[in-house]
Image (cartoon, rainbow, N blue to C red):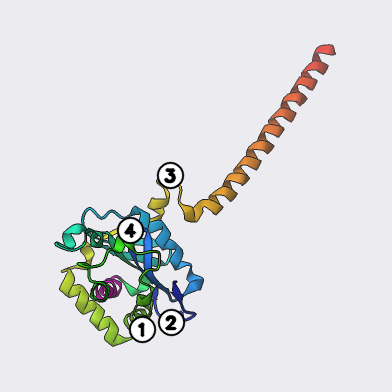
Amino acid sequence: MASSSSSSTTPLLYSCIAYRTTILAEHTASASSGASTLASIILPKISHETPQKLTYTHNQNLVHYVADAPSDHPGADPSAGGLTYLVVARSDLGRRVPFGFLFEIKKRFLGAYDPHTTDFAGLPPYGAANFNAQLKALMVEYGTTKAGQADAISNVQSEIDNVRGIMTENIERVLERGERIDLLVDKTDRLGGSAHEFRMRSRGLRRRMWWKNVKVGGVVEIV
């Protein structure tokens, strides 16, 4: 099961670890932010052919993730190459701290779940839920304490030379590609219903105008 907290003091709003689209562990620090729903948009778009480090922008938040590939885990269970570590953070936190957080949870998660002996593909949804508590603790530590943020920056410097090399894409572009996204089905259906009603009203108006023109034309001819 997912864990959540009413605390909104940390700028790290939501984090999860997933095998492809299956969330294995997660924690929501701010349920009111709706940040957790972004994972269902992003996870299906992630390719694990090559390692990825990417940031999506969405309103005042940034969605950061580190996606593994089989090349990250030579000799390990192939399913380890399908893992994604994701965090949603407020944009004013920047990228160094969130990515430092992601590198730390990756290290700890693989320490708890040995990729050489764990079949991540065989785990059910929330099959690593006992890791939720560590996600929560690290989100608070890295999001609110100077020591935690210093550790995050140190993690980033040891993993990548420059976070500016991380790709950035606006999440709205994902929504412009025409795929049907489960998260937006209800909204799309409502919009579709409104559009249908508009079309029906327009057709009715055109019919009434046509009959009006016919009647007017008939009157003119009779006169």
Please tell me whether residue 136 is drawn above or below residue 163 in the rendered image.
below
Magenta-colored span: 95-105
Label ID, residue 132: none
Going from N to C along the chain, the mark reached first, 4 or 1, is 4
| Residue type pointed to by label 2 | Thr
Percent x, y of residue 210: 72, 25
Give yes or no for contact between labels 4 and 3 (Cβ–Cβ under 8 Å).
Answer: no
**Residue beneath the point at 32% across and 61% down:** 122
Q: Secondary structure at mark 1?
A: helix
The Cα atoms of the two marked residues, 2 and 1, are separated by: 7 Å
**Residue beneath the point at 22% across and 53% down:** 49
Q: Does residue 3 appear to the left or right of 50 in the view shown?
A: right
Q: Secondary structure at mark 2?
A: loop
Going from N to C along the chain, the mark reached first, 1 or 3, is 1
Going from N to C along the chain, the mark reached first, 2 or 3, is 2
| Residue type pointed to by label 3 | Gly
Name the residue beneath numbered marker 4: 20
Going from N to C along the chain, the mark reached first, 4 or 3, is 4
Q: Does residue 191 appear to the left or right of 180 in the view shown?
A: right
The Cα atoms of the two marked residues, 4 and 3, are separated by: 21 Å
- Front: mark 4 or 1: 4
Give the mark count. 4
Residue 128 shown in magenta = no
Label ID, residue 144: 1
Residue 104 shown in magenta = yes
Q: Secondary structure at mark 4?
A: loop
Graded by Cα atoms within 10 Å as few (under 14), some (14 to 19) or many (20 or more), the crowding at tag 1 reads some
- Front: mark 4 or 3: 4
Name the residue beneath numbered marker 3: 178
Name the residue beneath numbered marker 2: 9
Q: Identify the main secondary structure in magenta.
A: helix
